[in-house]
Structure formats: structure tokens, C-alpha cells
């Protein structure tokens, strides 16, 4: 009697899981084909020698050894991380006020604000970066105005460098940070904010003492998202930073499509991928331990 | 003798005048006037949606009123932010900061006020003793039970020595036994601190037990503001009579020289009911509480003849539902068990003793 009643839900659950697997099979197969296969190809290429752009048979760790042993490469890696971190921080800085505003808005105003935040995502990154070029270029809007009003005589170097890339990338990735923070703020009990206010805390104090600590998981999720998207970004760095910029994704692009050094490009990619994966694992671990701390 | 200008003998803690508040097309508060005396325990009582929480939040400054003024300790605070009003607040959902320890929660208001570390520690210890939880200082709020969390919330609100403590259905999430226990504790703390308490609840028993005065609210208005005794014994209208305690309204006409005999309408063979005060109305509805109804064997000549419909055992009391010959209902609450047979369908006589409130017939 009891064995029947206990085994039945189990069997049902098993059946549901099997059905889910069956339904998910086409998507899984597509994912395997479109993600796993190219990845395998990438790792394969990173373990080969090349001769005039042609991969040679036989495996070697030489590509990795060369990259990891190179001071120049270490510097490039460090600069890339620093630039991506800068973009992430700027996104958090600009994103938080917007997210606070959205979280406090009424339902209709909120829908409109959501539209404003997500609308840029509908436009291709190439177009958006080109838009920034029109603003930041030597003959762009800003420099034209500055020169016309005699504030400067020479155009300011706003693009084709790190500054241009950071400005453009911050705008491109800002929506991800805002959405992540808004989700986190929505889960925050408004009575906590009210309690802090009644206890005498100013708005800034309330933000620092209550809002910020309790939205750390959202901040981290948004940061990891922006940071990893930025590490992998190529269009914005290439268009606004230029090909001379010291940025890993740009270097990979140059290695692969200008120098035809596929093994080096793929080895670089593999290292980058590994770094991002570690970051994700760290984030999951951190958020989980943070939540445990808050609930026990 | 020319009297002095009429001033309240006790200084007012809160003086609210003409408070209006609408949410969209819903009028939550309609021209509310409310005085809260220094040191009293005042309860806003009413069903959900009557505006009681909104009234409290307007006084706290958590909602901005559309019209009217709020004065606290004689100071106009209508346009001041909550943090400058010197209040304490306890929410139903406890609202403790989950990322801070119990001690940090209780000390937060003092920390914000820039008090020294030792002063905060002393006050936190004092507060933990007041709520009888001296051992939980280092725990996180989530590690405590609901009742404990609410006590900590109370301690946090009291720690800054606010001049007015607001409690928004603080016991609503707790089970009955715990609620009773915390009610007693609230009463004790109110007495011990001498603070003014503004309490919001929909539980009439809780309001009657705790309060010095009760404001019964409906549709954004205060229907009656009085002591629990008067709210219960002398309700101003049917709404208050019905909301606070069990009640039967008997339509009556007046009889007798001194206007103290009520002839119950539509109740064949009913003897007139003696009422405590002369009725101001010729036709009226008599407010009868179940405990004002005594049951006597049917041969008695004084009561309302009725049949027993239902006998409900309430533990220490027994509630008897009665039905008159014309179908009128009446409830009687007896202490303990009756010493004569009471069963469904039994013929009985109901005597109404000590009824004193006559409400006018319904308008229209």
C-alpha cells in the first residue's frame, strides 16, 4: 500500500523528465552541433602548428606556452581585464540610478521605461557603434561643436582609442546591468527602505546601508554579464577603439583574419573562455554563500 | 464664572486636521480629524480597505496627504520627511534588515543618529531585556521565530526613544496563542515606557483589550472615537455595533410613561423590554448583546418566547441561537452550561436585561 503510493509519484516524475528530455532533444542536438562542434574545432586548432595559414597534423602545446610565457601577452591580458572592469563599473554606476527609478515607478511608467532601456538592444551593435563614431569622431558632432565654438582648435581624441571604446561599450552593455539590477530591486521589501527612513537614515544612508547590500546578488549577476560580454565583444572595440588598441578580442581578430595565425587566435580564445568560465563559477559560489548568510 | 479658554488638559501628541488622500479614484481618507493624546494607546480599527493603514502612513509621512495638516507635539510636520518626525514603526511583516544581526538591527537608529558605540551597546542590551530575548543579539533575524522577530522589530522601533510608536497590524502574522502573549507584552511595554502608541488592527478583540481609545473606521472616515467601554456598550451606529462584538438589533417602538419600555415589533407574545435609559426615539432599533440575553424556562412571563435553533459550545461560554415565532433571530451567550435542558427546537423564553442603546430606524 505504502510502496504503491510512494512509487507512483516517482514514476510520474520519471516520465515527466523523460518527456522533457524528448521535447528538448532537437534543441539539445542543435546546441551540440552549433556550439560544441565549433568549440571542439577551436580547441583542435589551438593545439596545432600552422604553415602559411594551413593547420599541420600533430598536436602541440606550443601555442599556449608561447602565449602564457610572453610578457606582452600578459600585459595585453591585464589591459583587457582592466578595460572590461572599467566598463562594468561604469555600467553599475550609471545603471543603478536608472534601476532605482524603474523599481520605484508605477506600472505604466515602468513599461515605458523598460521600453527605453531595451529599445537599443533591437538595433545592431554595428549601427550603434557607428552612431557613436558620428558623435565621437574627429569630425563628429562633439568635436565639430567644440571647434566651431573655439573651445579647442584641434579635435579631441575621443575615438580610435580606449576612451572611445569605453564610452561606446558602456552604452551598449548598460541595458543588461539595468535589467539585472531592476530584478534584484523588485525583490526588495519596500518596508525595509521605509523602516530605515523612519529610523532616521537619509536617502543616501538608506541606499548604502540597506538597498546596496541587499541587491549585491543582482549587482554581481549584472557585472558578470557585462564583464563577460565585454571580454568577448569585438564590434565596439574594433569600431571605436580601432585596430591598434591593446584589447584581447581585437588581437584575436587581427591574428585570425589579418595574420592568419589561427592556432594563436584559437589558443587566445581558449584562455579567454576559461577565464570567463571561472568567473561564472565564482559568481555562482559567491551569490549562493551570500544568500545563505542572509537567510540563516 | 468665565471659564478659561478650552484647552485640552493633556497636551496633544498628534493633531490631524482635514486629512484627505486618494489613490486614483479610490478615496482612502475623507477629511479626517484625529487627536492623539500624549501617552495614550490609540487604535485604528476597521476592515481592510477602510483607510486605517493609510491614516497611519500619512501621520508617519510615508504617504503624502492630498489635503489637511498633521501636527506632532504642536509642530506642523505635514511636509516633513518621515525621518524628521521622531517616530517608531513596526510593520506586520517585521521588516528587519536580513543582512544585519539582531543587535545591529536594534542599534541601527542609534547608529544613524551618530551615538557612541558604548551607548548603542547599552541601549541594545536594555532593549533585548525589555523584550525578554537577551540571548539572541548575534543571530540573524531569519533564525528567529515570527514572534521573536516581531519583538526585535518592536525593540528596534523603541531603541531611539521615539515620541510616538506606530504599529501596523504587528500581530497579524502570528498564531492566536502567540498573539495573546504579545498583546499582553505590548500592554506592559506601553505602560513601562509611557510612550504614545498608535495601533492599527482589524481584530476588534485585540483593539478592545489593548486600547485606551479606539477609532472605528469605515470608507476613509472615523465612525466613532471613544474608549473601548463606550465603543462596545454605546456604539454610535449600527456599523460600530456590528463591527465590535456580536449584536442583534431588535426593531422596537416606545411605550410607558418614562419611555423606558420597548415593545419589540414583529415578535408575537413578547413582553416589553425594559431599557436602561429613556429612548430619544419613538421607533428605534435596540442594540442587544448576546450576554444581555438571559434564558428562562418558557413558563416565565417576562421574556420573548423563542425556539432554540443551535447550541454552540464555546468553551467557557455557550452561544445559543434563538428564533422568534415570526422568524426573528436573537443570540444569547451564557456563562458555563445552562442548568436546564437546552436542545434544538426547545421552547424557551429570552429575557433582555440591561440593553441601553437605541439607534434610529434606518434612513429612507
Image (spheres, grey):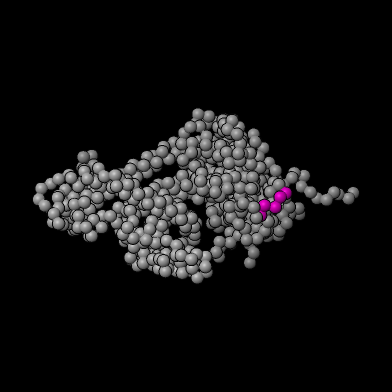
Q: What's the residue at 61%, 36% (across, down)?
A: B115
Q: Residue at x 71, y 47 (%)?
A: B73
Which quarter of the figure has residue B193? top right
Q: Nearer the viewer, residue B163 or B145?
A: B163
| Outermost residue to the top | B135
Q: Is residue B279 left or right of residue A24?
A: right
Residue B76: within the magenta? Answer: yes
Q: Quadrant of the C terminus of chain B?
A: bottom right
| Residue closer to the observer: B15 or B332 | B15
- Give left or right: position of A118 versus B213: left
Residue extent of the magenta highlight: B74-78
| Nearer the observer, B257 or B56 | B56
- Residue in view at x 49 percent, y 68 percent: A147
Residue A123 point in image, percent of width and height: 35, 67
Q: Position of residue B159 (x, y in %)?
A: 60, 37
Q: Residue furthest left?
A: A57
Whether residue B241 is visible, yes or no, is no
- Residue A69 magenta: no
Name the spot of residue A172 as percent of width and height, x first: 38, 60
List x then y, in percent, for residue B155.
Answer: 56, 37
Q: Nearer the viewer, residue B354 or A228?
A: A228
Say left or right for A260 vs A89. left
Residue A159 position by quadrant = bottom left
Chief SS of the magenta region: loop
Amino acid at each position: 500500500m505504502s510502496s504503491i503510493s510512494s512509487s507512483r509519484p516517482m514514476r510520474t516524475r520519471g516520465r515527466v523528465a523523460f518527456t522533457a528530455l524528448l521535447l528538448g532533444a532537437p534543441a539539445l542536438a542543435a546546441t551540440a552541433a552549433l556550439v560544441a562542434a565549433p568549440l571542439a574545432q577551436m580547441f583542435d586548432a589551438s593545439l596545432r602548428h600552422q604553415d602559411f595559414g594551413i593547420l599541420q597534423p600533430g598536436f602541440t602545446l606550443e601555442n599556449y606556452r608561447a602565449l602564457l610565457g610572453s610578457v606582452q601577452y600578459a600585459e595585453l591580458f591585464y589591459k583587457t581585464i582592466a578595460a572590461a572592469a572599467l566598463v562594468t563599473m561604469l555600467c553599475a554606476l550609471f545603471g543603478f540610478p536608472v534601476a532605482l527609478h524603474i523599481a520605484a515607478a508605477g506600472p505604466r511608467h515602468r513599461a515605458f521605461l523598460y521600453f527605453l532601456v531595451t529599445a537599443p538592444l533591437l538595433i545592431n551593435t554595428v549601427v550603434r557603434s557607428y552612431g557613436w563614431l558620428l558623435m565621437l569622431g574627429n569630425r563628429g558632432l562633439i568635436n565639430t561643436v567644440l571647434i566651431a565654438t573655439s573651445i579647442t582648435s584641434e579635435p579631441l581624441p575621443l575615438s580610435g582609442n580606449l576612451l572611445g571604446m569605453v564610452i561606446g561599450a558602456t552604452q551598449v552593455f548598460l541595458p543588461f546591468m539595468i535589467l539585472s539590477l531592476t530584478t534584484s530591486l523588485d525583490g526588495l521589501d519596500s518596508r525595509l527602505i521605509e523602516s530605515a527612513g523612519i529610523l532616521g537614515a537619509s536617502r543616501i544612508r538608506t541606499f548604502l546601508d540597506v538597498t546596496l547590500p541587499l541587491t549585491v546578488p543582482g549587482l554581481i549577476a549584472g557585472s558578470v554579464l557585462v564583464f563577460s560580454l565585454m571580454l568577448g565583444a569585438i564590434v565596439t572595440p574594433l569600431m571605436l577603439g580601432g585596430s591598434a588598441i591593446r584589447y584581447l578580442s581585437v588581437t584575436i581578430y587581427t591574428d585570425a583574419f589579418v595574420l592568419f595565425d589561427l592556432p594563436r587566435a584559437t589558443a587566445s580564445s581558449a584562455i579567454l573562455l576559461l577565464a570567463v568560465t571561472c568567473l561564472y563559477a565564482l559568481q555562482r559560489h559567491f551569490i549562493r554563500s551570500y544568500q545563505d548568510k542572509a537567510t540563516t | 464664572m468665565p471659564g478659561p479658554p478650552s484647552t485640552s488638559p493633556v497636551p496633544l501628541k498628534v493633531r490631524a486636521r482635514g486629512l484627505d488622500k486618494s489613490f486614483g479614484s479610490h478615496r482612502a481618507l475623507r477629511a479626517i480629524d484625529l487627536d492623539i493624546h500624549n501617552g495614550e494607546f490609540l487604535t485604528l480599527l476597521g476592515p481592510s480597505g477602510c483607510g486605517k493603514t493609510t491614516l497611519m502612513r500619512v501621520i508617519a509621512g510615508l504617504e503624502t496627504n492630498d489635503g489637511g495638516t498633521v501636527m506632532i507635539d504642536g509642530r506642523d510636520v505635514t511636509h516633513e520627511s518621515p525621518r524628521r518626525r521622531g517616530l517608531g514603526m513596526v510593520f506586520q511583516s517585521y521588516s528587519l534588515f536580513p543582512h544585519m544581526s539582531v543587535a545591529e538591527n536594534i542599534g541601527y537608529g542609534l547608529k544613524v543618529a551618530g551615538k557612541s558605540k558604548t551607548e548603542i551597546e547599552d541601549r541594545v542590551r536594555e532593549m533585548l531585556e525589555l523584550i525578554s530575548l537577551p540571548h539572541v543579539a548575534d543571530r540573524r533575524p531569519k533564525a528567529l521565530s515570527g514572534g521573536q522577530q516581531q519583538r526585535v522589530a518592536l525593540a528596534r522601533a523603541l531603541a531611539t526613544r521615539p515620541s510616538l510608536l506606530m504599529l501596523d497590524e504587528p500581530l497579524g502574522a502570528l498564531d492566536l496563542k502567540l498573539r495573546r502573549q504579545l498583546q499582553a507584552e505590548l500592554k506592559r511595554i506601553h505602560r513601562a515606557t509611557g510612550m504614545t502608541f498608535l495601533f492599527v488592527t482589524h481584530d476588534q478583540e485585540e483593539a478592545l483589550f489593548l486600547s485606551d481609545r479606539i477609532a472605528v473606521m469605515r470608507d476613509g472616515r472615523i465612525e466613532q472615537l471613544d474608549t473601548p467601554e463606550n465603543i462596545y456598550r454605546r456604539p454610535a451606529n449600527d456599523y460600530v455595533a456590528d463591527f465590535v462584538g456580536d449584536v442583534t438589533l431588535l426593531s422596537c417602538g416606545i411605550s410607558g410613561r418614562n419611555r423606558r419600555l420597548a415593545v419589540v415589533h414583529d415578535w408575537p407574545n413578547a413582553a416589553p423590554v425594559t431599557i436602561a435609559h429613556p429612548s430619544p426615539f419613538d421607533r428605534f432599533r435596540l442594540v442587544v448583546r448576546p450576554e444581555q440575553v438571559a434564558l428562562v424556562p418558557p413558563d416565565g412571563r417576562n421574556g420573548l418566547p423563542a425556539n432554540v435553533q443551535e447550541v454552540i459550545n464555546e468553551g467557557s461560554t455557550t452561544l445559543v441561537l434563538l428564533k422568534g415565532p415570526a422568524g426573528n433571530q436573537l443570540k444569547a451567550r451564557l456563562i458555563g452550561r445552562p442548568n436546564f435542558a437546552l436542545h434544538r427546537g426547545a421552547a424557551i423564553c429570552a429575557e433582555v436585561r440591561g440593553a441601553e442603546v437605541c439607534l434610529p430606524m434606518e434612513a429612507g
